[in-house]
RNA sequence: GGAGAGGUGGCCGAGCUGGUUUAAGGCGUACGCCUGCUAAGCGUAUGUAGGGGAAACUCUACCGAGGGUUCGAAUCCCUCCUUCUCCGCCA
């Protein structure tokens, strides 16, 4: 949600920001409704004032045993006028907030305009591995431990079923990443894997991503598309003290995505699935420090990749590639040696106060004063399937076995998977 | 799933036989006083959002959400959400 004052003062800027994100919004319609609302409000408040005074007069007269019929009649008449005006304003209010929910966040000034072709590669790390033999994609290397047909029999196409070392590798990675985050000072959260509408609105999956989420109609719940939802919503409608900031959280969740309309290219094997596992980092920050926090989250994610010895590059996303709620986002892509391409393994976003406004997440400044909105950030740390793709494809040996990086070999109890 | 009891300002908590409550009191917080220091004590201030005013200040709304009754609703009625207790079912 954007500040209404901003919408009134700089509608042009809001419109341009939306265009930069490929969203169509009608701010003139909003401005019209907003000024109509304010005019109506004045009228309503005046009438309420009159009614309050009349009620008070009735109360006084009745207590003194006097006749108050005149005041009661006038008050009733005021009430009739009021209720029709109130009906109009509540219609306008609903309309306004509906429109506001569809206004995307404004990208930061250093975000390049345009689509993904304008993403900027900020840095890369690691050497792209070279092989003396012809490399295989992960679905061939994992033929015996990754069974898409079995998953299809159970749940439908594009779900994952792992067995043996793949299942164990996934569990090990989740545990290793959570341990890493704990060591750098994050608190581990275990949250529900479903969430209700209000939560989805707060973190801004709704209204835009409705079609991309699984929904349990009977209980009116959504399966979470990312751990961001339950972990950020831990603080929905909460008022923090400034001293509580920053709040540094992490947590494992599965992520459910319908991926409607994305069948076809690039979704073979583990590249794009309906349910994947992810460890998420979430940060609630003082507004002055969210830039710093953004870098910090990025560094946590890349540090893990370095420990796993996976070549990666960091992109600053262009406006058209930014999500609805983000003001600024880094994507981390890792190398897939079997498919010879880069795969997105983490998106690290600063939402500034956009989610905080939607979810009413505030802090009281030290020394008192009005509560202010916090800044929220989050990032994958990291997403499992593509991490596994990279580990498997980059670590493959000529006999089809997989050599593990030492941090995992230690935990898996073996240096080679076969 | 059944029965019952709750949801009040940052927190706790009174009010809930409708009208001096424009929400008591406490805690917390801020400032001041007192005090070798600290603690305690005393005093004052302190909800959120929106509008008006140069300012002191003032108006309106908000007692889980939404409807209704009434001249007037935290208070009465209805629907929904949610928490707790007991029972049932169950990993």
Image (cartoon, rainbow, N blue to C red):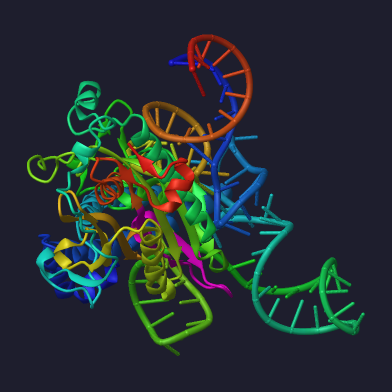
Q: Within the magenta stretch, is there residue A372? A: yes
Which corner quadrant of the image does residue A270 belong to? top left
Residue at the spot x=10%, y=60% of the render?
A: A24
Q: Position of residue A409 (x, y in %)?
A: 43, 46
The percent position of residue A147, horizontal first and vertical second, equals 24, 29
Q: Is residue A256 left or right of residue A285?
A: left
Q: Nearer the viewer, residue B63 or A220?
A: A220
Q: Give the camera-side residue of A248 and A269.
A: A269
Do we see residue A397 in this rendering? yes
Q: Quarter of the image containing the N terminus of chain A?
A: bottom left
A401 to A356, vertically: above or below: above
- Relative horizontal placement of residue A170, taking residue A114 as reference (left or right): right
Q: Which residues are magenta?
A: A356-381
Frontmost residue, A164 versus B34: A164
Residue at point 23% right, 77% down?
A110
In which image quadrant can residue A103 be found? bottom left
Which residue is found at the position 18% from the left and 49% from the top? Answer: A338
On screen, residue A204 above or below A167 = below
Residue A77 appears anywhere in the view: no
Is A40 placed left or right of B65 in the picture? left
Q: Which quadrant, please, contains the C terminus of chain A?
A: top left
**Horizontal and vertical percent position of residue A211:** 17, 40
**Tag count:** 0
Q: Residue at x 17, y 41 (%)?
A: A259
**Closer to us: A328 or A146:** A146
> Residue reaching furthest left?
A264
- Vertical placement of A377 versus A187: above or below? below
In percent of width and height, residue B36 lies at 90, 84
Q: Can residue A370 be found in the magenta stretch? A: yes
């Amino acid at each position: 949600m954007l500040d209404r004052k901003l919408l009134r003062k700089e509608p042009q800027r809001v419109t341009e920001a939306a265009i930069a994100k490929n969203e169509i919004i009608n701010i003139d319609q909003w401005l019209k409704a907003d000024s109509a609302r304010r005019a109506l409000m004045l009228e309503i408040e005046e009438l309420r004032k009159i009614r309050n005074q009349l009620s008070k007069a009735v109360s006084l007269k009745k207590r003194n045993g006097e006749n108050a019929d005149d005041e009661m009649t006038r008050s009733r008449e005021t009430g009739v006028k009021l209720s029709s005006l109130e009906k109009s304003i509540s219609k306008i209010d609903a309309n306004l907030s509906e429109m506001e929910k569809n206004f995307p966040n404004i990208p930061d000034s250093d975000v390049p305009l345009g689509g993904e072709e304008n993403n900027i590669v900020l840095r890369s790390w690691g050497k792209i591995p070279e092989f003396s033999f012809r490399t295989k994609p992960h679905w061939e290397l994992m033929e015996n431990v990754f069974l898409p047909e079995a998953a299809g029999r159970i749940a439908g196409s594009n779900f994952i079923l792992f067995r043996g070392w793949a299942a164990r590798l996934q569990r090990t990675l989740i545990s290793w990443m959570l341990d890493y985050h704990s060591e750098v000072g994050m608190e581990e959260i275990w949250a529900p894997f479903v969430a209700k509408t209000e939560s989805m609105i707060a973190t801004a999956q709704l209204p835009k991503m409705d079609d991309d989420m699984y929904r349990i109609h009977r209980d009116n719940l959504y399966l979470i598309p990312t751990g961001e939802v339950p972990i950020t919503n831990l603080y929905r409608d909460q008022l923090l003290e400034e001293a509580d900031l920053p709040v540094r959280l992490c947590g494992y969740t599965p992520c459910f995505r319908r991926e409607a309309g994305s069948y076809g290219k690039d979704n073979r094997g583990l590249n794009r699935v309906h349910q994947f596992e992810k460890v998420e980092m979430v940060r609630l920050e003082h507004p002055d420090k969210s830039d710093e926090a953004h870098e910090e989250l990025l560094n946590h994610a890349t540090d893990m990749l370095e420990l796993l010895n996976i070549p990666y590059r960091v992109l600053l996303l262009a406006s058209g590639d930014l999500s609805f709620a983000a003001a600024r986002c880094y994507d981390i892509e890792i190398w897939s040696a079997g498919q010879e391409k880069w795969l997105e393994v983490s998106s690290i976003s600063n939402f500034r106060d956009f989610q905080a406004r939607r979810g009413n997440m505030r802090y009281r400044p030290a020394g008192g004063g009005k509560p202010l909105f916090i800044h929220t950030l989050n990032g994958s740390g990291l997403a499992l399937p593509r991490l596994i793709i990279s580990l498997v494809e980059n670590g493959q040996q000529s006999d089809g076995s997989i050599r593990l990086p030492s941090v995992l070999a230690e935990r898996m109890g073996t240096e080679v998977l076969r």
